[in-house]
Image (tube, rainbow, N blue to C red):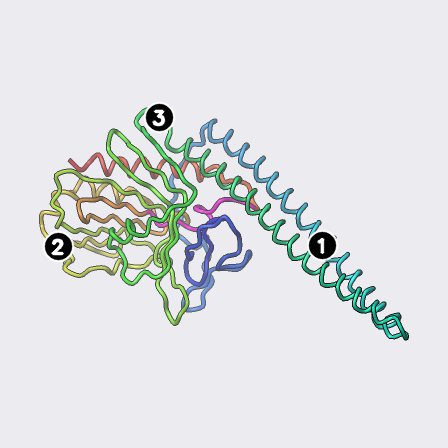
Amino acid sequence: MGFKKEEKKAVVVPQVEENALKKEGEEAVSEEGKVFNPEEVESNEEVLNVEESEKDLAKRIDEKREEFNKFGKKLKMWNYVVTAVLLIVLVLALVLALTLGNQEGQSWITIVVLCCAIALLVGSFIFSRYQRKRLDKVGNEYVQFVLGETNKEIYAGDRFKDLTFSITGDQRAIFDESKIFLNIKAFKSINVSSGLVNNKPFTVFDCAASILVKNRPQPRFLGRMYVFDLEGVDLNLRGLFQLKGKEYSYPVDDLDGLKLVDGNDKYTFYVNDERVKEVLNNKVLSIIKKFKIDKTIIDVIVSLNNGKLFVGIDYADDFINVPTKESLNLKNIAKSKADLEKVIEIREAIK
């Protein structure tokens, strides 16, 4: 549950329903037709320590996941039973209509049989809709539990205040305000939280954004976006810094009015005014460079625009998705915490 992959990179679909743009088991394929293998990514992962609270959370999520999967299997079994009964009744109805219905004076049997068959079909449709609604309801409750409990673990401590949380929320306008990619057509966001960290307002959400190429979605970003309001910063200043990734990473392209002031094969830095360097200063840039590009982090994009700081961490979709088939990876919680610490450090470095 969550975001699913299509073509080269995860395409945005926040769910609470499965199999939106990609069926389970399909592999992500690059534009050149090469199957992406996470093991080929340079081994450059952080050493993460798993805390007892994280182990306890993972255990509780696994228990909920088992309950959800059992419920889904139960509904599937009932659907099989109803379908089998419906087929048997329809076959019997057809046989009765062709035999007894053709006898002289028995035409009423055909009418009765047809009415019964129609009633069964309508009943089966209503039953399927009802089952689907039940599954969606349970699925929503499962996602609410996983995201809610995970956020409590990630955003724990006195430095976080006035936190609010929602499974879904339209954050398209905020994402567009970051001005990191042009021509975004498809956008979805989930797991939206906001509040204060160290008495500074922030918003964070998981999202995916895609452009359209020949009427097919081609992803540009899938991951977690942090947004901070900055006080005393000229609203006209724009800056874009991207810590580059490999084949899943797309270069930022909303560059109108910007010029490249620094860059190499590992990062690029664009500004519209030299004063941007006073905000995205050397200390800030050194913190961004602490992120490690590996099989979990695709790239990291930091944007300064309209008096706001945007920190987008482009993740692999198995990191960002809500687990349904496999157990929760304990390291994902620790990784989220470690990345959050860097994001907060970036914000604190801006005076």
- Sequence-earlier tag: 1 or 2: 1
From what the image shows, is residue 149 above or below residue 264? above
Is residue 197 found left or right of 316 in the rendered image? Answer: left
* Mark 3 residue crowding within 10 angstroms, few (<14) / some (14–19) / many (20+): few
Decide: marks 2, 3 in contact (CB < 8 A)? no
Segment tinted magenta in the rendering = 313-324
State the residue in front, 90 or 325.
90
Q: Amino acid at mark 3?
A: Gly
Q: At 76% across and 61% down in the image, what residue appears? A: 116
Numbered mark located on residue 272 in the image: 2
Q: What label does residue 157 carry, if any? A: 3
What residue appears at the point 62 percent right and 49 percent down from the top-left corner? 130
- For the image shown, how many numbered marks are present on the structure? 3
> In the rendered structure, which amino acid carries the disc numbered 2?
Asn
Marks 1, 3: nearer the viewer = 1
Q: Residue furthest top?
A: 158
Quadrant housing residue 166: top left
Q: Earlier in the sequence, mark 1 or mark 3?
A: 1
- Answer whether residue 317 is magenta in the image: yes
Task: Name the residue located 45 percent from the left edge and 59 percent from the top edge.
Answer: 36
Cα gap from disc 1 to disc 2, whole angstroms: 62 Å
Q: From the top left corner, tell me how far across and down residue 30 is, in percent.
A: 42, 64
Q: CA distance from mark 2 to mark 3?
A: 38 Å
State the mark number for residue 290: none
Callout 3 secondary element:
loop
Q: Are marks 1 and 2 in contact (CB under 8 Å)?
A: no
Look at mark 1 in the image and give the residue it sits on. Answer: 80
